[in-house]
Amino acid sequence: MYHDHQPPFVSKQCIYSTSRAWYQCLFQSKMVRGAQPSASLLLFSLGLVLLYFTSGGTIGLAEGQKTWCVAKPSADEKVLTANLNYACSQVNCGVIQPGGPCYKPDNLVSHAAVAMNLYYAAHGRNAWNCYFQNSALVVQSDPSYGSCTYY
């Protein structure tokens, strides 16, 4: 039976977005015929969010797919500095020292990203090894550049 009321339109790209981007995509999507989000859509959304967090933030990763941990560019400098110091106390951060392949660009976000990824890789690439006080992200595209290789 055809109903005049259509559910909100959510594009396919919204479904495959990260959690933060998914919310933005969901709430910025055009609504079909002015329909409002329904309770079932909100429950579905909540289910996806719960699935995301209970899976360690790795929904959609194929088994064996490589991931990297990088610093959020918007992270607080004090937090990044603490993360850099902590990571380098646990792993060898020689690659971000002057003359090292990852020294340039010589800035806190870049150095913290390399150090945090070294820690993440050394501790099993688990989502919880990339938390760093919520100042890091697990990414699926290799952030390596020039002679700086992220492992």
Image (tube, rainbow, N blue to C red):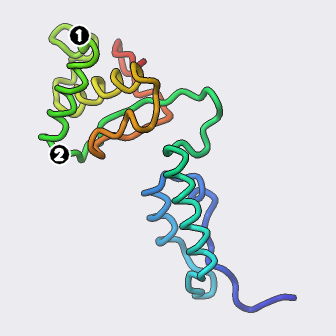
Left or right, residue 146 beside residue 38: left
Please rate how many residues cluster around mark 2, counting C-alpha atoms within 10 Å: few if below 14, some from 14 to 19, many from 20. Answer: few
Rendered location of residue 41, percent (x, y): 61, 75
Position in image of residue 57 (x %, y %): 49, 45
Q: Quadrant of the N terminus?
A: bottom right
- From the viewer's side, name the closer residue of 113 and 89: 89
Residue type indicated by callout 1: Gly
Callouts 1 and 2 close, C-beta under 8 Å: no
| Quadrant of the rendered image containing residue 63 | top right
Q: Is residue 95 above or below residue 78?
A: above
Q: Position of residue 145 (x, y in %)?
A: 37, 21
Rendering quarter of residue 107: top left
Q: Which residue sits at x=22%, y=16%?
A: 96
**Residue underneath mark 1:** 94
Sequence-wise, the earlier of marks 1 and 2 is: 2
Query: Is 150 situated left or right of 49 in this image?
Result: left
Measured in 3D between alpha carbons, the distance from the residue under mark 1 to the one under mark 2, in whole angstroms, is: 24 Å
Q: Nearer the viewer, residue 93 or 1?
A: 93
x%, y% of residue 84?
20, 28
36, 79: nearer the viewer:
79
Which residue is the site of mark 2? 76
What residue appears at the point 54 percent right and 42 percent down from the top-left corner?
58
> In the picture, residue 8 is in which quadrant?
bottom right
What residue is at 50 percent from the left and 43 percent from the top?
56
Side of 14 relative to 88 (left or right): right
Q: Is residue 138 above or below residue 44?
A: above
Residue at point 46%, 32% (across, down):
126
